[in-house]
Image (cartoon, rainbow, N blue to C red):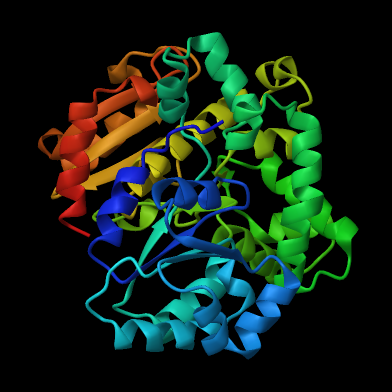
């Protein structure tokens, strides 16, 4: 069953203007289904099949002749030598757009080859798991508070919803089949037990300041190993590291990033929440709602083809604002709470106003499960995204 994706319109537009495009994202976010749906006349081949990957790597010219453009090439990172042949083909037919439609789950390897061979020839887009808004449009109804928490616990992987799958076996298979295989292939993990502990510890720390030394101590590995493992999760679109905003705020500001999972369902499984009530009754419920909110913002930007211009604020006294969005010389401030709170009672908002003045605050927004990001006016976000997009 097809669940319409908001990025579909953007894909069609870009394919008419650029000779190739590449869609990156975590495994099972729907990249392949998306491209097949948007470009039904294109040829298709997946390099997940070792025989196809070997031919593409060792005989790129012949491989492209077997699969003439327009062609969808799935998991293209498994044949890095193929990029130079794609470049040659594009250069011979530079006036043709939409020739190669590529996908990949390992962004670090992909972007290195794209930069080397396809610079100026390839548009890069990110496809995440479903947003709450996409789910609501598909279901033709709004998520109430109860349904929102179920969404946070279950996550947004399209197959879960299209096939009505139970989360626990889905994520168990997902980890064994995709995440462990892909990530271990990149960083050559020797001790799988340590890596599994690292994944679960990372999920338990979603929405929190990142401490390499603390994680390394808990697992029994070096901080450099933690940095390496986190960088791979980040490049695979499993996690997002949110940087602090400290422009004009002086040296009192914490400069450590915050760690977030990009899909709350995967984080819930790794954190050990086997039922919805386990999550709702946990002391981590607030962190998971904040993680969900961050994910919805990231998806909104990605579906517009924009790079998120997003930060957080925290000083050494513990005053914090969850999300800071610069818009020109002004800031939009977003705070996530499990229950409604008066805006003038939020200490982080007060501190930023003292530092930069109220005239530089564009908006102050409170997100709760009762008034979640999906309920913000589209006009507000459209204006903000256009203004921010012009500054990137």
**Which corner quadrant of the image does residue 153 belong to?**
top right
Q: Point out residue 385 in the picture as x, y percentages from the top left corner.
A: 22, 43
Left/right of residue 295 with respect to residue 366 in the rendered view = right
Tell me the residue at 41%/44% (across/down).
298
Q: Is residue 137 left or right of residue 212?
A: left
**Residue at (70% x, 18% y) in the render:** 276
Q: Position of residue 101 (x, y in %)?
A: 43, 64
Which residue is more in the foreground, 267 or 378?
378
In this view, the residue in front, 88 or 220, is 88
Answer above or below: position of 302 versus 169.
below
Q: Is residue 303 visible?
A: yes
State which quadrant residue 152 falls in.
Answer: top right
Residue 244 drawn at (x, y percent): 40, 52
Image quarter in which the N terminus is found: top right
- At 82% from the left and 52% from the top, the residue drawn is 196
Q: Residue furthest left?
A: 359
Q: Quick check: 134 above or below 87?
A: above
């Amino acid at each position: 069953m097809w669940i319409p994706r908001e990025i579909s319109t953007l894909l069609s537009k870009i394919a008419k203007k650029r000779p190739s495009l590449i869609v990156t994202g975590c495994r099972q976010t729907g990249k392949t289904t998306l491209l097949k749906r948007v470009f039904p006349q294109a040829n298709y081949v997946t390099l997940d099949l070792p025989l196809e990957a070997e031919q593409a790597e060792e005989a790129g010219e012949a491989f492209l002749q077997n699969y003439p453009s327009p062609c969808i090439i799935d998991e293209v990172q498994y044949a890095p030598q193929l990029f130079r042949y794609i470049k040659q083909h594009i250069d011979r037919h530079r006036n043709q757009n939409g020739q190669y439609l590529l996908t990949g789950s390992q962004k670090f390897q992909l972007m290195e080859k794209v930069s080397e061979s396809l610079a100026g020839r390839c548009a890069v887009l990110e496809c995440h798991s479903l947003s709450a808004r996409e789910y609501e449009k598909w279901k033709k109804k709004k998520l109430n508070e109860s349904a929102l928490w179920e969404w946070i616990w279950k996550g947004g992987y399209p197959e879960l919803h299209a096939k009505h799958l139970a989360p626990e076996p889905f994520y168990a298979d997902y980890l064994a089949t995709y995440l462990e295989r892909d990530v271990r292939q990149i960083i050559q993990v020797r001790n799988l037990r340590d890596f599994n502990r690292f994944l679960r510890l990372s999920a338990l720390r979603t929405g929190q300041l990142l401490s390499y030394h603390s994680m390394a101590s808990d697992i029994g590995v070096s901080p450099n190993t933690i940095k390496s493992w986190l960088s791979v999760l980040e490049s695979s679109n499993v996690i997002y590291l949110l940087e602090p905003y400290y422009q004009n705020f002086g040296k009192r500001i914490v400069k450590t990033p915050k760690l977030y999972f990009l899909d709350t369902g995967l984080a819930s499984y790794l954190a050990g929440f086997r039922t919805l009530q386990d999550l709702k009754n946990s002391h981590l419920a607030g962190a998971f709602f904040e993680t969900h909110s961050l994910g919805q913002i990231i998806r909104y930007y990605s579906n517009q083809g924009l790079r998120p211009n997003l930060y957080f604020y925290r000083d050494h006294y513990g005053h914090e604002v969850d999300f800071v969005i610069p818009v020109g010389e002004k800031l939009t401030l977003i705070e996530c709470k499990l229950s409604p709170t008066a805006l003038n009672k939020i200490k982080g908002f007060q501190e930023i106003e003292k530092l930069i003045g109220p005239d530089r605050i564009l908006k102050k927004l409170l997100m709760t499960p009762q008034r979640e990001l999906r309920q913000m006016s589209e006009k507000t976000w459209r204006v903000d995204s256009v203004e921010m997009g012009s500054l990137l």
